Image: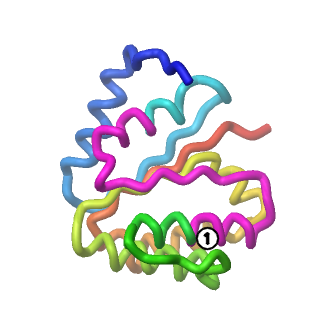
Amino acid sequence: MFRASFVGRSRELQVLDNLWQTNKATLLILYGRRRVGKTRLLTHWLQQHYDSGLYWVAEPTSALSQLRSFSQALMGFMDPEAEIPPDFTFSTWELAFRQLALYAQQKRVAVFIDEVTYVIDVNPDFVGVLQKVWDRWLSDSNLMLAFAGSQMG
């Protein structure tokens, strides 16, 4: 598949670089209309930091399917050599993020969750859980966490 070169967005890329270089927990919310380049910006930046980052896209599926998909992606990222059972799923988003916080104590990590509005649609408690885990665990880690989504309504 042909992909056009990445043009412009130098200011936005610099913001991502600055957040990365802080070497402390950072949280970025990137939202806007569909088809304006949010995903392309994040994936382009992450290609330059491929060994330190996880990019996961939520799909419009059930809450369990989303949690399973994220759990699989997270475990594969944290331990690329591990054989992860196909039915492995953290029991809650809180546990998944707590595991991520532990991992991000060891090294600088970027995790980008795209289409987060799909997660919120089927799991309205997600934002509250995220606030709790950010306040208790993630904010003390070495994590750069970014959420991207489209404006709703």
- For the record, the magenta segment spans 43-71
Q: Nearer the viewer, residue 99 or 141?
A: 99
The residue that mark 1 highlights is 128
Q: Nearer the viewer, residue 13 or 28?
A: 13
Q: Position of residue 10 (x, y in %)?
A: 31, 22
Q: Is residue 48 magenta?
A: yes
Q: Quadrant of residue 98?
A: bottom left
Q: Quadrant of the N terminus?
A: top right
Identified at 34% across, 79% down, the residue is 102
Left or right of 38? Residue 138 is left
Left or right of 136? Residue 141 is left
Left or right of 115? Residue 103 is left
Q: Is residue 120 magenta?
A: no
Q: Is residue 79 above or below residue 16?
A: below
Q: Position of residue 52 (x, y in %)?
A: 30, 55
Label count reads: 1
Q: Quadrant of residue 82?
A: bottom left
Q: Position of residue 81 (x, y in %)?
A: 38, 72
Identified at 25% across, 61% down, the residue is 108
Q: Is residue 4 above or below residue 94?
A: above
Q: Is residue 36 above or below residue 134?
A: above
Identified at 79% across, 38% down, the residue is 153
Q: Nearer the viewer, residue 141 or 73?
A: 73
Mark 1: few/some/many CA within 10 Å (<14, 14-19, 20+):
few
Colour scheme employed for the rendering of this structure: rainbow
Q: Position of residue 132 (x, y in %)?
A: 51, 76
Identified at 53% across, 35% down, the residue is 39
Which secondary structure, mark 1?
helix
Q: Amino acid at mark 1?
A: Gly
